[in-house]
Amino acid sequence: MGGGGLSVSLIGIGVLQTVVYLLFIRAIDLYEREQFRYVIPVFVWGLTVAVVISLVFNTVGAVALSAVVDSQVADVLTAVFVAPVVEECAKGLALLIAFVVASLVSLRRGGIEFSGVMDGIVYGSAVGFGFSIVEDVLYYAQTYAEVGEQTFVVRRFFGGFGHAAFTSLTGIGIGLIPWVRSGALKVLLPIIGLTAAILMHAFFNLSATLFGPLAYGFLFLVLVLYVVLIVFWLSVERRTIREELRDEVAAGTISAAEYAMLPTYFTRTFYYFGLIFAGRISDYRRARKVHEAAVNLAFIKRVGRKPYATPQQHKAELLRRRIAQLRGRTLRFRPSAAP
């Protein structure tokens, strides 16, 4: 037991659960899994910077409201109108920074690091999981005497999926920037995503204030909708891989066997297992890198279509050259490689 009756073991289980949920969310990004070097800093931002920003501004808001209304009313107003805005902006800032950094890195390395619905969900969940574990521990410390461990257990059962779901809307808005051609949409989509995150967060807090634990029924429905969205987007990615890599077979970038394998995650996974069990570890590592580059090439071609923007063309050529190098070949840049 920790000081003040806090269960250190219970908190430890909550932290472990957070890490497991984060790994799970990252794992369901089947085709273009995000690198830990981007996911972990976003997660750390959630449990440090976003928490500090939220504590400061939520406290300021609560104090200001308490000066004009009853303290209980001020708490409700803070939860519904102040906290959602402050917290979603604090978490969303991490996603914006990650997007900018990933975009700059991709110009040099090729590939596409933060793009699409799944990437938005992964990064939004990462910052949300980080934020929620600290929030739950602080809430547990403050309310232990009144409600004991049960409230902490209930909140941890959902494992921070509330904050993950809210901020994922911001992430989706940012992730769709490369997928749209309109400059107006590139600006509007992140704003729409952030606004939706704030509204969903506010509605959940209002429901929790009025109906208590029944608010988690609303959260459960939100998670079901996310499952549907994830399945839909994975089908979009699978179709993109199939369509965009078809001409790469004729060009010799990938083989016909690889083309048949890449759109099907489980077929590709069983192929990797076969290489590992056969002791062909170097072949496994090379195949993983080639296939990762090929999938990235498909997405780069998709987001750069009509017109095939010069930066995207440059990234595509970097990826073709990387695939050739992994196969022990050389490949010169093709300036006229636009489809």
Image (cartoon, helix red, strand yellow):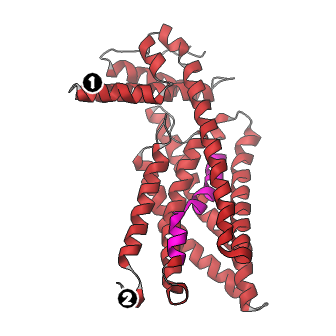
Q: Residue furthest top?
A: 250
Q: Is residue 48 left or right of residue 288?
A: right
Q: Is residue 158 magenta?
A: yes
In percent of width and height, residue 291 lies at 41, 26
- Can you say whether 218 is above or below 226 in the image? below
Give the residue number, with chain letter if any, for mark 2: 3
Say above or below: 230 vs 279: below
* Residue 133, label in figure: none
Residue 65 shows up from this direction: no
- Circle 2 Cα neighbour tier, 10 Å, few/some/many (<14 / 14–19 / ≥20): few
Within the image, what quadrant is residue 215 found in? bottom right
- When asked about the image quadrant of residue 151, the answer is bottom right
Rendered residue at 47%/47% (across/down): 26
Q: Circles 1 and 2: CB distance less than 8 Å?
A: no
Residue 71: x and y, percent? 72, 91
Q: Give the residue at mark 1.
A: 283
Q: Residues within 10 Å of mark 1 (few under 14, many from 20)?
A: few
Type of amino acid at the residue the image marks with label 1 = Asp
Residue 204 location (% of width, % of height): 69, 67
Specify whether residue 33 is in view. Answer: yes
Up the image or down, 72 lies above or below 96; here it is below
- Magenta-colored segment: predominant secondary structure: helix
Q: Is residue 69 magenta?
A: no
Q: Secondary structure at mark 2?
A: helix
Which residue is rendered at x = 29% and y = 17% of the image? 328
